């Protein structure tokens, strides 16, 4: 016992003990609180598999597609690395989306956890950028044309738009310089995500975890280990089993078959779509017929997410005690599912109209319902009827 106490006084072990062993956690948190640690696991999977894949990948337009095939066919265990990285990206987004939805439902963004929420949204934005440029690296048809469509959106920015596109491309078209830039950024950004994740954890541990009741739980707390580590392990095992199922039996389910065709600038795919985890953003983008308007709409999406702690005026955190907000919340989830489905559909009626209506609800939820509903609830809480 004395030896353990002496070991815990060492700087590295002291930090580990304070944040992962004896960290006081609210006694009533449920399994939904396990997605944060699970996201860290999948970030580790992405970094490790990415490092090994980079050892065999060649960032050259004539060799990129062939190098991926070489990894799949000739490198020992290469097929596993490639599929673990590709499916790991999908599961990383699944876990982070569930983590965000839990935060939205239980009001984890309320004071004093503004920095916690803002750093989490920053992680999501970095993930989207990292995944997009990673989607380009296999240099298949969907990689090339997806990069062409998305990077050209920057040209809509007044004055500096064309210069930004030229800088992104490294020239006047998507070519070898573009692929090299994307490969370098794709290798660097996961480490930046890990750094922001450390800030995220520090912000969390400064004020402690929230809880399903949305109340101050400074008294009813127990150590993270062994109680919640074991509870989180149930979520870890369940998701790792599901991840393994896709990895070994259906590794291409969440990818696009056109990306197994080498990039051809002379042949445009019939329908250009991003990966499934971008579809809701893509649907909002294309619901605006004007290119600049579409770019502005995407910027507004992240403005809404970043400013949510300041937009909310509710004195109640958990949606369990906000019946009307709970309905609006589930409508938002259904709206995001609808937008994801619209993102897969051709740009034609009625999909365009449905996408526009769904996009309107997304912005109305954050910019109208969130601030006004809080004020209405506060008025009802403080209302004193005349006797």
Image: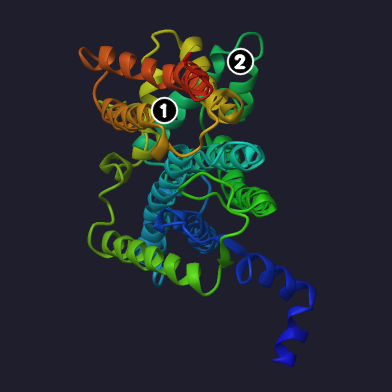
| Residue name at image x 34 percent, y 33 percent | 333
Relative to 5, is 363 above or below? above
Residue 227 visible somewhere in the drawing: yes
Pointers 2 and 1 in contact (CB under 8 A)?
A: no
Q: Which mark is residue 320?
A: none
| Residue name at image x 20 percent, y 13 percent | 350
Spatial separation of the CA atoms under disc 2 and disc 1: 21 Å
Q: Position of residue 118 (x, y in %)?
A: 62, 37
Q: Position of residue 131 (x, y in %)?
A: 48, 43
Write down the residue under mark 1: 281
Q: Position of residue 48 (x, y in %)?
A: 53, 63
Residue 241 placement: quadrant: bottom left
Q: Counting other residues with Cα less than 10 Å from the Cα at mark 2, is it few (<14), some (14-19), or many (20 or more)?
A: some
* Nearer the observer, 211 or 307: 211
Residue 135 placement: quadrant: top left
Write down the residue under mark 2: 161
Looking at the image, the residue that sits furthest to the left is 350
Q: How is the image coloured?
A: rainbow
Looking at the image, the residue that sits furthest to the front is 387
Query: Which of marks 1 and 2 precedes in the sequence?
Result: 2
* Nearer the observer, 360 or 221: 221
Name the element at disc 2. Answer: helix
Relative to 238, is 76 above or below? below
Name the element at disc 1. Answer: helix
Quarter of the figure with the N terminus: bottom right
Of circles 2 and 1, which is in front?
Answer: 1
* Nearer the observer, 199 or 295: 199
295 displayed left or right of 3: left
| Residue name at image x 51 percent, y 11 percent | 292
Q: Counting other residues with Cα less than 10 Å from the Cα at mark 1, is it few (<14), some (14-19), or many (20 or more)?
A: some
Residue 70 visible somewhere in the drawing: no
Q: Position of residue 227 (x, y in %)?
A: 49, 71
């Amino acid at each position: 016992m004395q030896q353990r106490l002496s070991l815990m006084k060492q700087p590295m072990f002291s930090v580990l003990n304070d944040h992962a062993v004896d960290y006081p956690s609210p006694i009533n948190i449920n399994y939904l609180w396990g997605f944060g640690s699970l996201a860290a696991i999948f970030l580790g999977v992405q970094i490790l598999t990415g490092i090994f894949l980079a050892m065999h990948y060649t960032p050259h337009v004539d060799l990129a597609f062939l190098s991926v095939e070489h990894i799949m066919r000739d490198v020992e265990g290469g097929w596993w690395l490639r599929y673990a990285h590709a499916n790991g990206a999908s599961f990383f987004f699944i876990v982070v989306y569930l983590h965000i939805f839990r935060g939205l439902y239980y009001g984890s963004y309320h004071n004093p956890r503004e920095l916690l929420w803002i750093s989490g949204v920053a992680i999501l934005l970095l993930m989207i950028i990292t995944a997009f440029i990673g989607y380009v690296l296999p240099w298949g048809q969907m990689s090339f044309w997806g990069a062409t469509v998305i990077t050209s959106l920057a040209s809509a920015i007044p004055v500096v738009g064309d210069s930004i596109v030229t800088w992104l491309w490294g020239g006047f078209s998507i070519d070898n310089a573009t692929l090299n830039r994307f490969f370098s950024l794709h290798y660097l950004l996961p480490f930046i995500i890990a750094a922001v994740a450390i800030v995220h954890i520090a912000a969390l541990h400064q004020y402690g975890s929230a809880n399903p009741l949305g109340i101050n739980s400074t008294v009813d707390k127990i150590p993270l280990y062994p109680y919640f580590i074991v509870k989180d392990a149930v979520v870890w095992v369940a998701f790792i089993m599901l991840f393994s199922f896709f990895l070994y039996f259906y590794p291409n389910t969440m990818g696009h078959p056109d990306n197994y065709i080498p990039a051809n600038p002379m042949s445009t795919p019939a329908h250009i779509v991003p990966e499934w985890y971008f579809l809701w953003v893509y649907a909002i983008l294309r619901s605006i017929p004007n290119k600049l308007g579409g770019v502005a709409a995407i910027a507004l999406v992240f403005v809404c997410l970043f400013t949510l702690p300041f937009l909310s005026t509710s004195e109640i955190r958990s949606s369990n005690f906000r019946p009307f907000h709970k309905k609006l919340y589930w409508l938002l989830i259904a709206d995001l599912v609808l937008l994801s489905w619209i993102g897969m559909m051709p740009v034609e009626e009625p999909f365009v109209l449905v996408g526009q209506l769904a996009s309107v609800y997304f912005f109305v939820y954050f910019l109208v319902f969130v601030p006004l509903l809080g004020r209405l609830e506060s008025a009802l809480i403080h209302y004193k009827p005349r006797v």
